[in-house]
């Protein structure tokens, strides 16, 4: 899909590298630019693999190439500008204004590299009163309102299981808009500068809830239709301690339950929990699959899942499984190692001494 597209990624940690992971998975070449002193901080972040390397770094940077450049050095800036002559996409996640102070102002790059698509990922966007503020995933989700929907313990929402602002609001939004900008460039010949705000990315996902609130609906944390208030949609513990997800939203699925069970189904959540406690998770999953009932897998079970394997979602050795969604054009890229810091300097950088 993106074969022939060259991406230069200046970002580190999670949102930017995951955005370029999506693009790499769709066939793009990704050149990772790292600080020569420490590299991407994710290189040293737990959890670690048996060889001592970061599991997250290995997964998100598989098949990429690394160059080490001190972007405060004018010579390195010149080398990067030369590299951008051959690039289609630039991804960066500095705070707004930092790239300009490094001599790489996106406004200037739009003139000198008119076909370049620039994706600037930040917490709050390039403009506005909070543009320069620091932040992390939890704060962005809080400002977008998504944390307010969760069930509360002692009046405090539970921490989300995934960093949604990083992975979806930042990474997925950036990858999607980069693809759209590349498509538009095929028609116009012009690149563009994409302002990707992680907070606004989560806010976009909140659209149905905000529309309902504007219409007068007041959501109850942990008790709305999709957050625990509807018998047809919930999680239940089974006889063996396993968990199943009941998601029989449509009548066609809910009405199948009594047919599959051979008796009426209670509408009360507590009675449903009593029902599901009578059999094991896998027994329920097999019996009730036609009614939108699925097992809740632990992560080790996900790696062993035959369903995911038959979809081609896993690659790598048994000791080092890597995720590769089936929509990736070249799923074999995940078997490639993550790059060593600066390993491609001599190959990719012109001399500007």
Image (cartoon, rainbow, N blue to C red):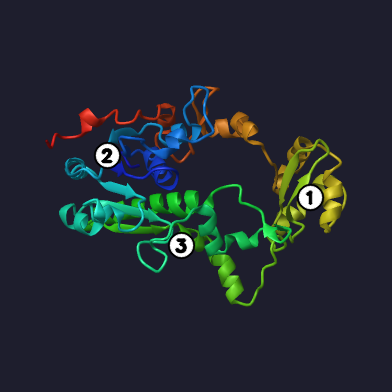
Q: CA distance from mark 2 to mark 1?
A: 50 Å
How far is the residue under mark 2 from the one under mark 3? 31 Å
Q: Earlier in the sequence, mark 2 or mark 1?
A: 2
The residue at which mark 3 appears reads as: 200
Where residue 152 sits: x, y (%)?
A: 71, 58
Which numbered dot is residue 4?
A: 2
Q: Secondary structure at mark 3?
A: helix
Residue occupied by mark 1: 257
Relative image position of residue 24 (x, y in whole percent): 37, 39
Occupied quadrant, residue 70: top left
Q: Mark 3 and mark 2 in contact (Cβ < 8 Å)?
A: no
Q: CA distance from mark 1 to mark 3?
A: 40 Å
In the image, 260: left or right of 188? Answer: right
Q: Of tags 2 and 1, which is closer to the observer? A: 2
Callout 3 environment at 10 Å: few (<14), some (14 to 19), or many (20+)? many
Looking at the image, the residue that sits furthest to the left is 353
Q: Nearer the viewer, residue 339 or 264?
A: 339
């Amino acid at each position: 899909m993106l074969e022939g597209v060259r991406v230069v990624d200046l970002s580190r940690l999670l949102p930017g590298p995951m955005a370029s992971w999506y693009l790499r998975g769709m066939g793009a070449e990704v050149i990772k630019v790292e600080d020569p002193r420490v590299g991407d901080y994710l290189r040293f972040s737990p959890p670690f693999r048996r060889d001592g390397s970061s599991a997250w770094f290995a997964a998100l940077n598989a098949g990429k190439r690394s160059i080490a450049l001190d972007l405060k050095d004018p010579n390195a800036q010149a080398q990067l500008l030369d590299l951008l002559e051959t690039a289609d996409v630039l991804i960066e996640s500095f705070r707004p204004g930092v790239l300009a102070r490094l001599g790489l102002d996106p406004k200037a790059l739009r003139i000198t590299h008119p076909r370049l698509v620039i994706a600037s990922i930040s917490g709050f966007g390039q403009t506005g009163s909070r543009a320069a503020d620091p932040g992390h995933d939890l704060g962005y989700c809080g400002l977008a309102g998504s944390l307010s929907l969760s069930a509360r313990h002692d009046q405090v929402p539970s921490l989300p299981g995934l960093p949604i602002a990083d992975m979806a609001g930042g990474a997925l939004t950036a990858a999607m808009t980069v693809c759209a900008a590349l498509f538009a460039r095929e028609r116009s010949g012009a690149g563009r500068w994409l302002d990707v705000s992680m907070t606004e990315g989560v806010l976009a996902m909140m659209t149905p809830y905000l529309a309902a609130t504007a219409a007068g609906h007041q959501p109850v944390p942990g008790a709305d239709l999709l957050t625990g208030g509807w018998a047809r949609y919930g999680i239940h513990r089974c006889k063996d301690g396993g968990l199943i997800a009941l998601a029989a939203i449509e009548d066609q699925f809910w009405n199948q339950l009594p047919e599959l069970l051979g008796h009426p189904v209670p509408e009360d959540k507590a009675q449903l929990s009593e029902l599901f406690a009578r059999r094991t998770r896998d027994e329920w999953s097999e019996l009730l699959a036609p009614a939108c009932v699925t097992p809740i897998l632990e992560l080790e079970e996900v790696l062993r899942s035959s369903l995911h394997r038959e979809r081609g979602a896993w690659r790598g050795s048994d000791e080092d499984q890597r995720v590769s969604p089936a929509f990736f054009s070249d799923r074999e890229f995940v078997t490639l190692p993550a790059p060593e810091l600066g390993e491609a300097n001599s190959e990719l950088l012109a001399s500007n001494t």
